[in-house]
Image (cartoon, rainbow, N blue to C red):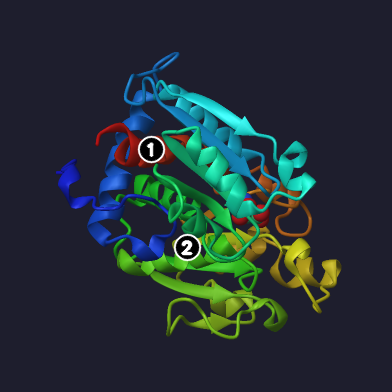
Amino acid sequence: MKTLDRTVFTQNHLVGISDLSPDEISLILNIADDYAGRMKEHKFKCDVLKGAIILTLFFEDSTRTRVSFEMAAKRLGADVVTMDVRTSSLNKGETFSDTIVTLNAMKPDGIVIRHNEYNAPSYVANRVDCPVINAGDSYREHPTQALLDALTMRQHFGKLDGLSVSIVGDIAHSRVANSNMMLLTKMGAKVKLVAPSVLMPEKTVVPNIPCFDNVKDGLKDADVVMTIRPQKERMQNVMIDDAAYYRDFGMTHEKLAYAKKEAILLDPGPYIRNLQISDAMADDATRFHYTQQVSNGIAVRMAVMDLLIGRK
Ligand code: NCD
């Protein structure tokens, strides 16, 4: 029986998986599962956020996360205001802090923020009167991505506890890998990291995670393989050779065969064909559950906004 008891949820913001208890994670996934089912209805819309105005602030590029938050808010009946950061007064010399004070004075009911600075969502959360949701900050955390990944795994396997998940790629620069490591270990899954040594962090956010420099050992017994894009925009003093990366870590059917026979492949996107994933692998929807992840992204963000903003 899936609990929908909202009293277990004590958060005022969602800035990271690090703040969530296993019960809070389960509750978000349970509500999200409900929304995922209801989204199958044509033109599904409800009034959980009716009258609310959600402000989205994206200081970094985004396709799916921004659209997903906006569609989630609208399906819940909210209006969405998107600040165009490129044409904002930050370019005229206003400080970030003053911009936040200004926007807060307009009384949004919720703020969704993506920022390249470490912990920027907490900085904002401490200065505004409404819930703040982290849509990805620096390489630190991307909580709603880990939640949608978890929902996709849970729908497929019926559980998270005991699953074996191998995360392959640029772990060192990945907020997605960090949030996933925290979420999965909190929920009883086993995580392995697989990366070339230059893309493996010196210290992992969760201690004692087994690390591998080759897919043969790293994918052994995996139920889920998650590929992570080489995030060249965040690399300093590191160069990777694309051909060598693809040869050693690019996901193909041959490499996926090192995992369990029924293993599924996930990727947060954007995925880069023939660097991270072969064409044949990317086009194999029986193994690569990417579109399910994207759909679940909306359901998870609806659940998070419902809990934080909808029913106070
Ligand atoms: C990721 C991100 O921006 O952190 N994408 C996403 O939100 N789905 C991963 C990436 O950029 O590689």
Residues tagged 2 and 1 counted as in contact (Cβ below 8 A): no
Q: Quadrant of the C terminus?
A: top left
Q: Which residue is the site of mark 1?
A: 305
Labels 2 and 1: the sequence-earlier one: 2
- Mark 1, other Cα within 10 Å: few <14 / some 14–19 / many ≥20: many
Which element type, helix, strand or loop, lies under badge 1?
helix
Relative image position of residue 205 (x, y in whole percent): 48, 76
Relative image position of residue 228 (x, y in whole percent): 63, 61
Based on the displayed image, in which of its 4 quarters is residue 276 positioned? bottom right
Relative image position of residue 108 (x, y in whole percent): 46, 33
Which element type, helix, strand or loop, lies under badge 2?
helix
Q: Residue at x 15, y 43 (%)?
A: 5
Q: Amino acid at mark 1?
A: Met
Based on the displayed image, in which of its 4 quarters is residue 171 positioned? bottom right
Residue 235 visible in the shown view = yes
Q: Amino acid at mark 2?
A: Ser
Residue 64 drawn above or below residue 212: above
- Mark 2, other Cα within 10 Å: few <14 / some 14–19 / many ≥20: many
In the image, farthest residue toward the top: 42
Q: Residue at x 83, y 66 (%)?
A: 242
Mark 2 vs mark 1, foreground winner is 1
Q: Quadrant of the N terminus?
A: top left
Q: Nearer the viewer, residue 216 or 103?
A: 103
Q: Residue at x 35, y 31 (%)?
A: 35
Relative image position of residue 216 (x, y in whole percent): 60, 76
Q: Nearer the viewer, residue 175 or 60?
A: 60
